Structures are given as structure tokens and as C-alpha cells.
Amino acid sequence: MSLRRPDWAPETIDVERPSVARMYDYYLGGSHNFAVDRAAARAMVAAVPQAPLMAQANRAFLRRAVQFLTDAGIRQFLDIGSGIPTVGNVHEIAQRHAPESRVVYVDIDPVAVAHSREILAGNDRTAVIQEDLRNPEQILANPDVRAMLDFSQPVAVLVVAVLHFVSDDDRPAEVLRALRSALVPGSYLVLSQASDDGRDETERAEAEEVYRRTDNPLWVRGRAELTGFFDGFELVEPGVVWVPQWRPETPESAEDAERAVFLGGVGRLGG
Amino acid sequence: MAEPPDGQPCVGVFARAWAKAVAGTSYLPMTHAQLEMLLQRLTNLLAEALRAEPLDLRVGHRVANELVAAHIASAEALGRTVEVIQLRLVRDLDLVADDIEDRLARLLGAVATGYARALRDRTLDEQESIRRAAMTARAEAEQALRASEARFRHQATHDPLTDLPNRTLFAERLAAAVTGSAGSGRRVGLCFLDLDRFKRVNDSFGHQIGDRALVAAARRLRRAVEPHLVARLGGDAFVVLVERSTGTGDVVAVAEAALAALSEPVVVDGHDVTVTASVGIVERRVVGTSPDDLMRAAGSTLLWAKAAGGAGWALYDAERDSREQARQELSAAIPAGLERGEFFLDYQPLTSLHDGSVLGVEALVRWRHPRLGVLRPDSFIGLAEETGLIVQLGGWVLAEACREAVGWTSASGQPPYVSVNLAVRQVRRPGLVQEVRALLRRTGLPPNRLQLEITESTMMTTSEEPVRALRALAALGIRIAIDDFGTGYSNLAYLRDLPVTELKVAGEFVRGLRTPDALADERILASLVSLAHALDLTVTAEGVETGGQAERLRAIGCDAGQGWHFGRPAPPDHILARIR
Ligand SMILES: C[S@@+](CC[C@H](N)C(=O)[O-])C[C@H]1O[C@@H](n2cnc3c(N)ncnc32)[C@H](O)[C@@H]1O
């Protein structure tokens, strides 16, 4: 444990306040959540009825992206904003096909981190750290990260369903640039985030209202902005799309894709 | 019961329908193909169960468990599953039996029961694990907070250079030691320690090496005085707290251990840095003392140890302390005393040994202290000299003497001069000459009726300033006398170059004249007088107490005398009465 004074005091580990990590677990059908989380999630569902579908579509995108990366030979993953390890975690997907794969999970939520530690105890190819995406240097300098990942080899950085919790004031483009600068060619970046493209204005306002109760207010963005975040990477086909459209397993599963609200894409560091 | 020729296609149709029904009910961590494969296997299990005799309801539970284990685990998924089995299983698989409706209902009941149970178990498990995670997170955060608080507390209570406890922590511990055990007859001791001339280490080796020497000294100290608390108060000052002392000896032993530990030279960066230290020791009963008292006493005692040359300890002495404190208070009261007019002058005649006339009078300052009564100069002039207040006080004496003397008239013509002592600091101060000149102008006192008495040590200086000032004063016509001659270096050579008019020979020599066979003193005096006369100086003998002494002095050729024999110091009107 770092000796730095934690920015999170014990009172922030507060099951009286909804956590986006546990709300997300609820959307996915998990029970790793408390009454406050469920209340907030239900309020979200009242405002945006397809919220659980959005979460499922995003999680499925994550699964397909990791599968794609594993097939592309990637064996190292840095999953930032990894959440509560519910079902279909990155290491489960990657290690099924390539058991030597190494995964570091990073989350800002101390409960999510504690839960991850418990789930992953005994898996010596994974590590969990509590860090803030907005401090990329701290993440990269973290000894556990350094011990698990070899940055002289390609690494896939996953920032999936997290960027909408990072406001423009926190300079997400600079954060991603800092992460990119640690990567060697052949590395990948996976991004997804909630989008406001073609969204109903009142629905969005209500969703934002719900998330204001959490520690992570929403900051939705459009396709152009998300594409801009891949600066320095070459987008793999089909680029930044509604997540169900990203390499769907069956043609039907890509139908009504914009209902998923999430945009996502995968970029490869060339050169 | 008829077996279909090839069950697989039918199973596949049903499994696809089933997969479609449950897809989207919750997140399923698998591809659609994987989902269909799983459900096909479960369909086969169900089909076998429906065909088998007797009906094994455990198959229903098993299917339910597998569904939930594969994360097909939601109320919606159960509803859809029941629905699709009820509607399609028998038809799609072409199952025929008389009691097939009955068997299906019972098997479906088992599936639903098993599913509900598995789902509940899973929910409870997940609730338990997230609760445990929340507890762990909270405990970790609290521990981190405690650790950081402990670190903050350490930082706030320790010196960053040496990591010794700092003044704050020391003050806490001392307060606890003193107040915590009041009335118990307990004793407490302090060693206030300061490195001797440590500034020199910094000056000659630089601060970096100085700091490292301090760190080394601190480490030794800590080891030497263990288990007692040693704190760094700042700079090169340390203090050791000896709790539960059994007597002075305990604390002296601690001080000696500290001194011994420090006496070994430290090698810093190849330099041999030798430091010695001084220690002020206080040891007393806890009852009736306070942290402030103890610290003040230890501080004064440290100064005694330093004044005694350093490299040693001194033990607190209440009498000496109160004496010094009284002196301190006295000196602090001088400015207010001047303001309130508490000082006044007495005068003592300087009488001619030739004709008994009063040649001059020496102004002697007194202090009518509101509490202590009238004080003579020996109880406060030394203090005033130490503190520098002598400049103010001496200035007042000079002005007052001139003011009073200007009105004196003598029946015999020439009124006596007034003789005023000038302290070293006064002579060295620039502006003395202007001050005296302005004073004479203001009062109208003729310069030749003012005599300034300086001591030999005033002249023992390499600086030209005082000599130049005295020349200027002499040039105005003011008399310059060397006071207490014979007690200092008595270097006669400089008298040649100085504008001195008179020597005042110290009373010690005169006292010797009391015994009839004090030949040595008499000879010294005689040669002094003839030497002075050779240099054109007059000689006044101080401390003349008897007629016999006066007689001898006259015989030697001494010019004037001062002392009880000729008159004690007295208020100005007494003197005036004598000269009229
Ligand atoms: C919606 S979940 C996404 C989980 C997972 N990446 C996925 O897509 O399935 C978002 C997670 O991001 C975390 N998060 C939010 N802001 C973060 C930040 N600044 N740094 C790190 N994690 C953050 C939240 O605690 C939450 O666990």
C-alpha cells in the first residue's frame, strides 16, 4: 500500500452512496450491489429503459475486443476502470485461449478493487491496483503494474465504459497520450463510452441527473470526439461504431445498434 | 416410446429457440454459438429424462444448476425457459407418451425449483462477497488513514534532520511527566545540552557537513541516554528528559553518558569533526514545579556550564539562579527608574594634601529603588555595563553632574571641579565629543571644572577612536583622569601619548599604608608618584581612611586624597557647606 495520503477517506467507502461500478453490475444481472445502487439503477432504467441492454452490449463488445486481441497475439492487458469482476472478465476471456496472458486491473472504486483482489487471489497472472485513470503516470509507475507487464512488448490498454466518467476538464486526450507514450508499436487501445449522438435530450438530462448522485457524473461524447481519442493509433475495422456493430458474431446481433448508446473501437499502435 | 430416427436436428431446433429466448435477459459471457451448444446439451438431458422410466426429477435440478452456473441466471431467463420448454420441447422433439403432459409438468416443476434455489444461492453469495469487499475496503482505507495520520503525527513531532523528537513532542512528554504524577513525590530531571562552538564546525566545513555531524551527534546521544527521551530543540540544542529520577545522581549520570558519547570525534566525509558539549542539569521533585520552570532553570544552568568553559555539566543552584534573576530584574528596571527620576547623585570630595582644600568632587550615582531602597553603584553599574544600559545611565549622570556643579561657588575663589566616571561603552560611542560639548554649552559649566574618569582598560584597545575622542575632549579643556590606576595593566608608556591630567591610584595601595611596616606598598606608591610627576600628572589616592595614611601620602608627595578620612559621599548641599 502506498504511503501517500489517500485522497479517498474512509467515509467515501460509503454504501449509502450509489457506485457506478455496482450499478453496472446490476445492469448486467449481478447481485454485487447494495440497496442504494439498485435504487439509482432503477431510476436510471426508468429514465433510459434500455440501460441494462446498453451495459450488456458494452460488456459483449469488451468480450469480442479481447477475443480479437488474443487472436492478434496480444498477451498483456491493462484494464483501466475494470469495475466489479462479475462475469466475463478480461483474464477469463484471454486466459481461456492463451493461459500465459497477464492482466492488470485498475479501478478507482475501493470496493471494486477489494472485490477484485478477493476474486483474483491465487491467479498469479493478474494484479489489481487502486488508481485513477486521470493519473496515468501513477498507473504506469506502479510497481505491481511494472512487475506484471513488460512494456517492451505490446500491451493492450482497455478503457471501456469509463471515459464518460472523465470530464473534458480532466483532459482525457492528454491522459490517453500519456498511456500511449508507454506503449511499443503493435500495442492496442480499446475505448468505449456512452454517446449523445442522436439521443433524446430529456432522456440524456435524466440520466445525467441519476449519475450526479454518484461520485462519477456522466460526460457523454459524440463519435468525432471518441475517434479523436485514438490519436496516434490506427483504427482497426470497422472503426468507431455503435458497440453491437463492432465485429458482431451474428448479423442479427448488430440490428438496432444505436439503441446500445455506447460507441466503441479498437486502435493499433503502428510504426 | 418412439425414438426419433435422428434426434439431433430436432434438438438443434429447440436449442436455437431456447437460446433466442434467453439471449438479452442478462449479460451472458459467451458467444451465441457457445450458448446454443450449452443449451443443446441441456436439451438432450431433458429429453432423456422425459423418456426414462422412472422419471428422475434430479435431472431437472441439474439442468437448472447448469443454467445458473453458466450465468444464464435471471428471473427473465427462468420465465423464458419455462415458456419455451412448455410450448416447444415435446413438439420439437416429437416426444410421445401417454403421460407426457404429466411428466413434463413434473420435470418443469423440478427445473423451476432448482433454478430458483440456485439463483437465490447465487444472489446470497454475491451479496456476501460484495459486503465483505466493502468491509475490506473500509478497513484498508481506515488503516491507510491511520498510517498516514501516524506519519503526520511523526512529522509533526520529530525533527526532520535527525529524526529525534522535536520541541512539540518534548513539551508534551515533559508536561505529562510533571502534571501526570503530581502529589506522588516523584522526581524529574532535565539535561539541557548544547554543542560548544558548533557554529565553527559549520563555518569551517560548511553546513552540509555540519548537518551530518549533527545527525551523528543525535544518534550517539540517543543511544547514550536510552531509554530516556532526547529531543532536538533546534540548532545544536538538545534536551534529555529523565522521568522518575531517584535523585541528582541519576541525571548527572545521564549527562556524563551524553558527554562521553559526544567526545569521540565523528568522521564526516573524511573530516574529523570533534564536538564537545555543555549540559545544564536540573533535578527536582515534580511537586511544585512546572515545565516552564524546569526549562528555564535548565537553560540558565546551561549558560553556567558554557561560562565555565564548556565541555562539562553544571548543576542547577537555586541560590545562584535567584541572585542572577534578581540582577536581571534590576537591570530591566533601569530605564523605567531613569524615567521616574529614581537615580540621584552623591558627591565625595577630592581633597588637597597640601592645604586641605576641596579640589574636586566625584559624582557617585545612587538609585532610590522603590522596593529595595537606596542602591549603591556596585549593585547595578556592572549590570548596566553588561546590558549596554550604561550609555543611557552614564549620560544621565554626566548631565546631572554638570547641571548641579555649575551653581557651586567657593568662598576661596575657584569652585571644585566635578569628576564623572565614563564607562568603556560611553567612550567608544561615536558622538561622545559632541554630546559633551553640547552639554557644557547648555549648562554653562566651564570645561576645566569637568573631569572625566576612565579606566585603564578603556585605553587597552586597538582602535583609534577612543584616543581621538579623549584628545578632542582634552583640547576643550576638560580634565582626564585614569581611575583605579594600578589594578590593570598599569602600562605607563601609553600615558605619554594620552591627554591625561591625573592618575587616581587604587585604594589597595593605600590600604597597605595602615600597617607601619608596609614598606613595599609605600615604595610602589612613591615611585608611582614620582613617575606621574615626571609625566606632568597629578596623583590622587583613593580609599584614604585614616589620618596616618593621609600623612604618609603627603610625605610621599601625593597631590590629593579621597576617602572616608576626607569625607564620605554625601548630597550636594553637604559639599556646598564645606566649600563655602
Ligand atoms: C461502467 S464500469 C466499466 C467496467 C468495465 N470496464 C466494462 O466495460 O465492463 C466503469 C468503471 O470505471 C471506474 N471508474 C470511473 N472513473 C474512474 C477513474 N477516473 N479511474 C479509474 N476508474 C474509474 C468505475 O469505478 C467503474 O468501476
Image (tube, rainbow, N blue to C red):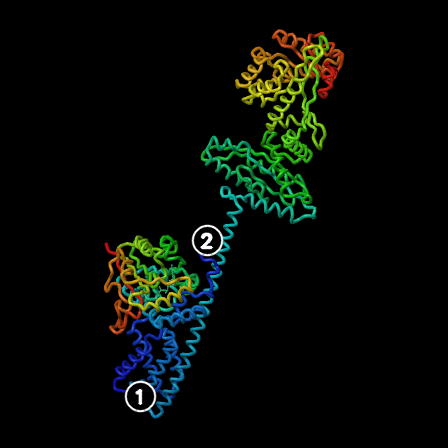
Where residue B311 appears, x then y in whole percent? 58, 32
- Taking B94 as reference, is B212 above or below it? above
- Taking B12 as reference, is A172 above or below it? above
Image quadrant holding the C terminus of chain A, namely bottom left
Disc 2: which residue: A5
Q: Which residue is drawn at the image coordinates 43% and 70% (left, top)?
A: A39
Where residue B101 appears, x then y in whole percent? 35, 90
Q: Nearer the viewer, residue A247 or B542?
A: B542
Q: Which residue is drawn at the image coordinates 37% and 88% (left, top)?
A: B103
Q: Amino acid at mark 2?
A: Arg
From this viewpoint, which residue is outermost toward the bottom?
Answer: B98
User: Viewer-nearest of labels 1 and 2?
Assistant: 2
Q: Is residue B59 left or right of residue B448?
A: left
Q: Nearer the viewer, residue A29 or B532?
A: B532
Quadrant in the rendering for residue B542: top right
Q: Is residue B348 left or right of residue A99?
A: right
Q: Amino acid at mark 1?
A: Leu
Where residue B438 appears, x then y in whole percent? 57, 20
How many numbered circles are shown? 2
Disc 1: which residue: B95
State which chain disc 2 sits on.
Answer: A
Quadrant in the rendering for residue A200: bottom left
